[in-house]
Image (tube, grey):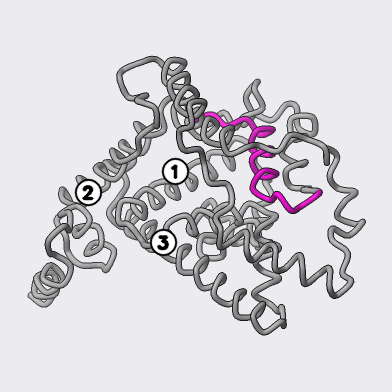
Amino acid sequence: MADSFALVVGLARLSGRGKRPTDVALFLFGEGLPVPEPTVRAAFHTAVDTVRLPGGAESGQDVEGQLDAVASYIGHGGRAAVMVPTRARRMDEQIAAFCQSAGISWPPAELTQWDENPASERMTPQGAALFAADALLTGSAPLPQIGALLRGMTPGLEVNPIASLLETTMRDVPDSPVLGPDDSLAMLTGDVRHILHELAGTASQEDLGAAWRAARDVRTWALDLCTRVEAELAARAPGDATMEWWISRQLPAGISLLEELRTRQEKAAGTALSALVLLLQREQFAEIDRLQPGCQWDLAQTPGVLPPPVRTFLLPSGASASL
């Protein structure tokens, strides 16, 4: 009875003109209220349906035709990907200026030596939009292209050891059972939206709820970190927050930082999509652990590799025992 009353109160609080029922259902579900399971799953399915490719690439064409439509749209002045949001770029520039004024050399020689390809291609916003469309339609993302993406997302960084690591992975582990012939993780095939649709229908309510909370925690972490960094920079006293930001910007966690800054206000569909992607990542990590035992999952705890709120969530079962 108490849960039902709380659900009614929640409906009254969140409902209103312009509020979509699926968004209300997702927010109530995220608060742990007893939203009927069919309603929850339908809302997650609707969130997946919001993912659209630009350029009219939804007309039943094959993958090549859809990618051609996206490329044509971008080539004719259509909106490309925002690589680095203004807020992030401003913080990057302020940190670089502070380092210069303080006589701090960046990058240090110790870091420079770990990038084997400092002159490698940096992905452009146009290239990033096409790369994202290709990855969405095929479920494949070659590691060298991910390296180029990371370089494009850190325009002020002369070297990027993590990008270099991705670009050379196939050379270092040529017989890996989890890498395909195109240097991509051979875990998914086909349109990722279909896979997320299936996951929305098969994942337990408990897993959906845990993933939703993790996705919201990532946003809270990212926005809170930005606020703390801006306060430190305004006081001309860079500290722990600035260091966490600078490390994350050069490592995979920086992708999450930039993604959250692209959205000014939380959207239920966006959080639901992030939750499903986290569940998919967790499944992929578990499959990688099965195919290639002995992975160094303890590296997931290294600052900057993963956003802190999802480190434990994404680890394969039992991996945390080795940390």
The answer to whether 175 appears left or right of 21 in the picture is right
Residue 160 position within the rendered picture, expressed as x and y whole percent measured from the top left = 77, 48
- C-alpha separation, residue under disc 2 versus residue under disc 3: 22 Å
Camera-nearest residue between 154 and 315: 154
Q: Amino acid at mark 3?
A: Arg
Which residue sits at x=55%, y=55%? 85
Dot 2 alpha-carbon crowd within 10 angstroms: few under 14, some 14 to 19, many 20 or more? many
Mark 1: which secondary structure? helix
Q: Does residue 159 show up?
A: yes
Please identify the quarter of the rendering in which residue 266 is found. bottom left
Name the residue beneath numbered marker 1: 280
Relative horizontal placement of residue 78, taking residue 50 as reference (left or right): right
> Which range is magenta?
139-158
The three-letter amino acid code for the residue at tag 1 is: Leu
Q: In terms of secondary structure, where does tag 3 sit?
A: loop
Q: Is residue 322 visible?
A: no
Instruction: Check disc 2 and report the residue beneath it.
Output: 43
Q: Earlier in the sequence, mark 2 or mark 1?
A: 2
Pick the front one: 130 or 168: 130
